[in-house]
Image: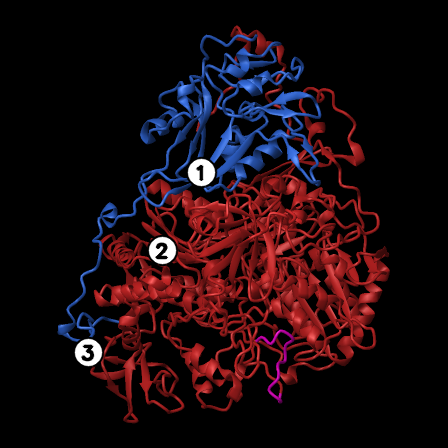
Chain colours: A red, B blue
Amino acid sequence: MTVDPKPATADIHDPHAKADKVDFSPSLGDEVKYTTCYMCACRCGIRVYMKDGKVRYIQGNKNHPINKGVLCAKGSSGIMQHYSPARLSKPLKRVGPRGSGEFEEIEWDEAMDIATKRLKKIRETDPSKLAFFTGRDQSQATTGWWSSMFGTPNYAAHGGFCSVNMAAAGLYSIGGAFWEFGEPDWGLTKYFMMFGMAEDHDSNPIKIGLGKLKKRGAKFVSVNPIRTGYSAIADEWVGIRPGTDGLFVMALMHELLKAGKIDQQYIVRYTNAPWLVIQDEGASDHGMFARDDEGDPLVWSTKDEALKPSTDITTTPALKGEYTLADGRTAVPSFQLVAERYLDEQYAPDAVAETCGLKADDIRRIAAELAHVAFEEEIELDIKWVDWAGRRQDKMIGRPVSFHAMRGISAHSNGFHTCRAIHVLQMFLGSVEVPGGFRIKAPFPKPIPPTNKPTGKVDHVKPGTHLPGMALGFPTEPADLLLKDDGSAVRIDKAYTWEHPLASHGLMHMVIHNAWKGDPYKIDTLMLFMANMSWNSSMNTSKVIEMLTDKDEDGEYKIPNIIYSDAYYSEMVPYADLILPDTTYLERFDCISLLDRPISSPHSAADAIRYPIVEPDRDVRGFQGVLLDLGARLGLPGMVNDDGSAKYPGGYPDYIANHERQPGVGLLAGWRLQDEDGDHMDCRGPANPNQLEKYLENESFWHHEFLPEHTYYKMANKGYLEWAHELGCVVTKTQIVFHMYSEILQSFKLAGEGHGEHQPPEEHRERIATYFDPLPIWYQPLEETLTDLDEYPLHALTQRPMHMYHSWGSQNAWLRQITNQNRMYIARKLGREKDIKDDDWIWITSPHGRIKAQVKLMDGVNANTVWTWNAIGKRAGAWNLDKDAPEAKKGFLLNHLISELLPARGDGYRYSNSDPVTGQAAWFDLRVKIEKCNADEVEESWPQFEPTAKPPHMVDAPDILRYGEEFKPGKKAKNAKDAKNGGSK
Amino acid sequence: MTSLPQSTNKRLGLVIDLDTCVGCHACATNCKEWNTGGHMAPLTDQNPYGKDPDGVWFNRVHSFEVDRGDGPGVTINFPRSCMHCDNAACVTVCPTGASYKRAEDGIVLVNTDKCIGCKLCSWACPYGAREFDEDEGVMKKCTLCIDRIYNETLDIEDRQPACVLTCPVGARHYGDFNDPNSNVSKLVAERAGRPLMPELGYNPTNRYLPPRARRVDAENIGAQSRLDPVSPRKGFLSWVDNALSR
């Protein structure tokens, strides 16, 4: 880095420079404040420079563990988000029909009264009549707890339509996940394969990592039907056919097995590959693990020629062979079943190549490359460590191949199994939690799966009563499903039913449909936070808008009451009855908790806060504080004292510092109290009333770096597990054994096959027996199997641009200058076939509906795939944009083409358009056809919607923005005219 | 017309690595937020919420595809800002002396007090790096963050252009091209950094590092192109070692 001294302009003959009075050292302002970005899900640390009460500049915090000083396009545009003219300014009560946007402003007291009365009645009669779903919520540890205290099982955030396949497949396999819960060992990996990612949750860490990786010369392979963003800088772009990644991965597994290129020591030690699986076709425990009396799974120890418990470290467990159990039955190591499965010729590269749209030679080559790097370029770190059993290890062995995967895997109805296949491939290569491999971020890995089960069983949901635990959790057997006595769903979204048993994030995409239909039952109030469910966050947008406004015979809305909290005038606002206006991210408290989705890294634990950098200039309140206030008014447990007074009179910050989830465990791990003297300690300790001050002193985050000997092999690392146990992340200090073979899935399969106390009804049996395979399977995405593929030959996908991924509202004045119209991107070759040229308008038709859009041709896209940027299209009138904004007139949503239900099967039943294991929304299973518009058709996107009315007192959006003119150093801007309509003031 | 310095003490500029740029636009928006309150403030936006939003940006990123005829083609993300040319035509065409190149460090600036908004400089610039502020009626452009790089109120490591500090992939580098030992000179030497359109003769200071050769073939990383299967005649899973310790 070059550091230049002050220029010696005076000594140099430079009349032009002398004439121009440059101020080289302008002050950045009065103070620098540190908080956490909220422009996407990444949660970077930011330094906010304040000048004269306004935000001068937002920079990445170089001390912050997530972003280390860098900041993305979204974070750098935070000023425009904060000063957006689309901000709501006061609570609103709907006065016109839903959707009209006719509201009257009311005081907070009245708003809270309205909400309290309604919710009180619900809680006193049937708490499940409240459905509370959140969108880009970063406080799920709080919103989830609140709903549990309310007593409704109907809670989830938006994971069900985003990432649950990644989360569940990971948590049921390796106790961690891709998603944002793990990352490649950027500093050491030599071969990195990325599946289905354009930009992601872990926005800046991935970019920082890719930069490191390219600098070191590691090979980077991107598997993605579309070559943009990260794929653009990959050494190799594998332009796979959407939805076939699982098959490709299984072909890689096939090649490795055929060549014996498996890290046998790793799978013996760290996975359940040697555990013996009962082979007794037709028996109720067929396919389950053979266990001893203590419940410990058995292995066959070749040294002892005996059955031994898997935890016995003196054994030499067999990976193949047939062994006789004490009861005379046969069992085989699960690895033998794995090998039999994937050695089958149906997984040979030649057999899968055409389906995947790849060359068999390329699949063989990539398998050879993976094996080469894993085994010929093994890493040895000179770090001594102690394993879970107390055995000293002299070195840390690393296999420097790593994987990461996200949306392109997640958003298919076969995504759970595909993701699990990638995890099994990682196990084959011995590359999870090792130097150079894929590493899991603290507080993961957790037990497989995490030990909290979903609550909301029939006897849990009672008037005036809280749930015994959190609504969302991880079932391990059919008995854990949430079913009523008649077999119907407990939850409005039908999560944890036989239709999607492992729906650990709920199914937000089904809530409006089910509530409208009254299936499984009618609700009273739908409460949403930061979720644009009448627009880009719903499948079947046009119909969802009808559902939100549909009335029954009595003239009442079918969804009787909708409460919504948002900071901006999003498309959802006009469809709610009561609006609780939220603050911007620079005006609020928040905590980024280890109990939630932490900002930890593989080598450290971390959490953080947001705090108000700027006081709101509107009558708005942070939603979490409003929730706590509502909770106190409703008298919810944990939110009131014995005398009925509010437990957290100081609002959200009071709660952040003083609330304890378990004794000694609160939302923030840093600077808790140790003893009565007031000494501090981290992780576990009594609440510290001054905790937030400590965070502020430390730039709003806490960071605990692990010792080098604790940073790898965390699933089997004694020192790490003891720390995690102390923190409460793991229940015991014993090893977390990876599930190559999933006995949990097998237990559901057996139920489907007619075994056990809890069995699916006849109509769901085959589905359960098929999709609950203990080993990863590949199947054609469900919607494709019910679609005429000759009629609809193309796959249709969406991505979000890097400068908008997970950002809330593309009304941002700077970001929308980068992208304000999305195009339908199609392969150049396809364009030639269809006589479609750049800028032509086309109709895109699915079995469900059609839309009109403008085309851009490109080369870097799978020939059978069309795609567009998601969530650029806006409804006219929303976000305080001009009604003729390109977002509304030319932008479009693909959502109109996607149904939330699959086509009917034989008996007429329609499942949700979701993964049958997890309920993950299958956005990317969509099939379409395209045709060129007629020359006389109007050049604007379709469908178009009536512009929504502007809420009262929303400012006029300025027609010129001179943000920053007041900060200009030295001199005033030349000829600056007065800002019109408030301008940048 | 405005004269250029014979030579400059330093040649400050940027190296931009096209091998790692993912086209995320972080440099563009961070530049915008810094500079809209900086030396050339404001970077005015016209119709920011309207039908045709159009603002002043000193740094823009273009993404496009190139088919080099030797494979499946590549997608290139290409950030573009002022090149601070040695032979800056935007300066020599300036009728008022508003546009000038600093003898000290080679940075090309606009003195807005002298700018009459004639736009000759934007016609002269082959890189499209000039940005006219319709509202003020003056030309604006990248200052190489002249109010950061010498700014004594900032920590030393922060005295770099905003685009460089914010770049998440580390694709942007700042330094003195007159110093053969500077990071930028070394990068250019190591990676065959090249100017944009040198044939035009403006001798731009900024350099682009071309994408590294893409390693698709197995031999690039010393691997075989396919694995040798263990002979099935040896039996099922013959290669399995059943005696590994737990």
Whether residue A952 is visible, yes or no, is yes
> Residue A765 in the image: x percent, y percent?
48, 85
Residue toward you, A748 or A397:
A748
Please say whether residue A382 is one of the residues in the magenta stretch: no
* Chain under disc 2: A
Q: Earlier in the sequence, mark 2 or mark 3?
A: 3
Q: Secondary structure at mark 1?
A: loop
The crowding category of the residue bearing disc 1, from other C-alpha atoms within 10 Å (few below 14, some 14 to 19, many at least 20), is many
Q: At label 3, which amino acid type do we have?
A: Lys
Q: Is residue A751 left or right of residue A28?
A: left
Q: Is residue A671 found left or right of A782 in the rendered image? A: right
Query: Quarter-wise, where is residue A159 in the image?
Result: bottom right
In the image, are marks 2 and 1 on the same chain?
no
State the separation of the CA atoms marked 2 and 1: 21 Å
Query: Is A311 rendered above or below residue A48?
Result: below
Q: CA distance from mark 2 to mark 3?
A: 34 Å
A337 w.r.t. A654: above or below: below
Quadrant of image for the C terminus of chain A: top right
In the rendered image of this protein, does residue A503 appear above or below residue B113? Answer: below
Tell me the residue that label 1 is attached to.
Answer: B170
Q: Which mark is residue A303?
A: 3
